Image: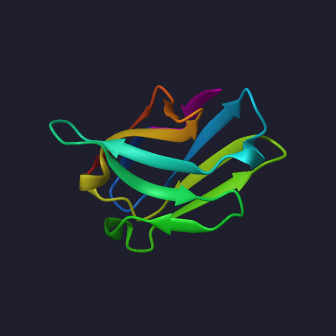
C-alpha cells in the first residue's frame, strides 16, 4: 500500500487549497482514511477522517472550514480547505491502517501567509 499527497502550496489567509491523496496497492474502498498535519515544533495532529462508508469526522480546530471526501473509483482522497488561517501552515499527510500498521504518505506543505 502506498500513499502520495499533492496539491499543497502557498496561499494567503482566507484562501483555499485542495489536497489530494493517491492510494495504491489495494482498493481504496477497503480502507478508512485520515488526514494529519504537523507544524514546525509541534506534534502531528489529526485533521479529518473518512470511513469506508463515507462518514467524516473533523478536529475541533477545523470549525467547518475543511471537507474530506473520497473517490473509490479513482483511488483518491481529498481535503478541501477553505478560509485558511496562518495557523493552518503545516505539512499535511494522508494515512491509513494496513496490516495492523500505519501507512503514511510523504506529506505536502501548505503555507498560509497572513
The secondary structure making up most of the magenta span is strand
At x 33% / y 70%, what residue is drawn? 60
At x 65% / y 58%, what residue is drawn? 69
The image quarter in which residue 4 lies: top right
User: What range of the chain is rendered magenta?
Assistant: 1-8
Name the foreground residue: 13 vs 33: 33
Q: Is residue 73 something one can see in this rendering?
A: yes
84 lies left or right of 103: left
Inspect the magenta stretch and tell me whether residue 101 lies in it. no
Q: Is residue 114 something one can see in this rendering?
A: no
Q: Quadrant of the N terminus?
A: top right
Q: Quadrant of the C terminus?
A: bottom left
Q: Can you give x and y, in whole percent of width and height, for residue 113 in the image?
A: 27, 48
74 over 65 or under it: above or below:
above
Q: Can you give x and y, in whole percent of width and height, for residue 33 in the image?
A: 58, 48
Name the foreground residue: 26 vs 5: 26
At x 63% / y 68%, what residue is drawn? 55
At x 44% / y 68%, what residue is drawn? 65
- The colouring scheme, among rainbow, by chain, secondary structure or one colour, is rainbow
Amino acid at each position: 500500500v502506498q500513499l502520495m499527497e499533492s496539491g499543497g502550496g502557498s496561499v494567503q489567509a482566507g484562501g483555499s487549497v485542495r489536497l489530494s491523496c493517491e492510494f495504491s496497492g489495494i482498493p481504496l474502498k477497503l480502507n478508512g482514511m485520515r488526514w494529519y498535519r504537523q507544524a514546525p515544533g509541534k506534534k502531528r495532529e489529526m485533521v479529518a477522517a473518512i470511513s469506508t462508508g463515507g462518514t467524516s469526522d473533523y478536529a475541533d480546530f477545523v470549525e467547518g472550514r475543511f471537507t474530506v471526501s473520497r473517490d473509490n473509483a479513482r483511488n483518491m482522497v481529498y481535503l478541501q480547505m477553505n478560509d485558511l488561517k496562518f495557523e493552518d501552515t503545516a505539512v499535511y499527510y494522508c494515512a491509513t491502517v494496513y496490516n495492523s500498521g500505519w501507512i503514511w504518505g510523504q506529506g505536502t506543505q501548505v503555507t498560509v501567509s497572513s
